[in-house]
Image (tube, rainbow, N blue to C red):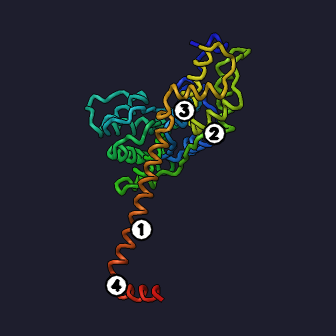
Amino acid sequence: MYTLQFNLRENPFNLTPDPRYLFLSPQHRGALDHLIYGIIERKGFIVITGGIGTGKTTICRFLMSVLDESIDSALIFNPFISDNELLQTINQEFGISPTTEGKTKKHYIDSLNEFLLKNFASGRNAVILIDEAQNLSPSVLEQIRMLSNLETEKEKLIQIVLFAQPELQDLLCTASLKQLNERITVRYELEPLNQEQVHDYIEHRLKVARESNGNLFFSQGAYKTVFDYSKGIPRRINAICDRALLIAYTKDARSIDKKMIKQAVNDIGRSYLTKENSSSKKKNNFLIFLLIFLIFLFFGLVITMNWDYIIKLFPNIISISDL
């Protein structure tokens, strides 16, 4: 809507995970380096975690666009599947023709193993990328662990990358998934952008979307306000900036200032931007309440256990105060 007015080829702040717009902050470059290392060195399991909107899916799509031609990839973007459906989807992604013998788990694994052995013999590699992995059921995660048994005496035949929110780490620490957790040798956690990186992130996206001469500018106060409200989370930055550009369009303005950013935040709704923080505050308030309760409980127990001594001490205290 506002692209022509600001001389932009397209909307620079879409929420879709377009790999062309990936901003390689030190955090995102670190995640990408870990991914490439884990895949090339055939480390088996790789886990990339990060909060909602930190850019995990964008990194996943970017990785697929830069993988070497000798690496076959299978992308699983729907985690709400059964273990049998997982195997079926993996085989479909790798282009493995379904067997005429049936659609059992054994047939899927046998077909996949045959494909991977031929792949390895021809000097190729294979990688499975699973997005939103925190939503996988324990049975599917266990099936994923079993896939890592497809290996030669020296090399892993398949590399498995899990992109997930931090809750996956808690899930992996459960007793039932201990074996899977111990097989993960490459891990990386994405952190939000700092204030300087938010500035560079916005400029990067504008540069990708601009025609030769841009006529849209953000004030320094606007950059700082975006950081304050977004907490450095890319998805929130996009939402705020997109609405700010719409406000500037309606006002026929060419620059985005602090006031417009605040108006954009109000239009979006502060609850959208602070939902994560609110839940965190509730958790902290509960912990404080629990601590106070335990302190009172402790002193209550002490008083109860020493009640006779306190009663005997009381007259002495009164007599001393009368002197």
Residue 10 as seen in the image, left or right of residue 291? right
Decide which of 13, 187 is in the foreground and name it. Answer: 13
User: Hey, which residue is sitting farthest front in the picture?
Assistant: 322
Q: Is residue 158 at least partly visible in the picture?
A: no
Check residue 236 in the rendering and tell me which mark sits there, or answer none. 3
Instruction: Determine which of the numbered discs, if any, sits on residue 311 in the image.
Output: 4
The alpha-carbon separation of the residues under discs 1 and 3 comes to: 40 Å
Mark 2 vs mark 4: which is more N-terminal? 2
Nearer the observer, disc 1 or disc 4? 4
Residue 295 disc label: 1
Q: CA distance from mark 1 to mark 2?
A: 46 Å
Q: Earlier in the sequence, mark 1 or mark 2?
A: 2
Q: Quadrant of residue 41?
A: top right
Instruction: Kindly check if marks 1 and 3 are in contact, taking CB atoms under 8 A apart as contact.
Output: no
**Mark 4 is on which residue type?**
Ile
Q: Position of residue 70 (x, y in %)?
A: 56, 32
Residue 28 versus residue 237: which sits nearer the camera? Answer: 237
- Give the amino acid at mark 3: Arg
Front tag of 1 and 2: 1
Say which residue appears at 67% left-offset and 16% top-offset.
253
Disc with the residue nearer the chain's start (1 vs 3): 3
Q: Is residue 234 above or below residue 178?
A: above
Distance, label 2 to label 4, CA atoms, is: 68 Å
- Nearer the camera: disc 2 or disc 4: 4
- Residue sitting at 32 percent across and 85 percent down? 308
Q: x, y (%) of residue 98?
A: 33, 28
Q: Position of residue 193 (x, y in %)?
A: 62, 39
Which element is circle 2 on?
helix
Q: Is residue 101 left or right of residue 208?
A: left
Q: Which residue is mark 2?
A: 29
Q: Secondary structure at mark 3?
A: helix
Residue 150 location, quadrant = top left
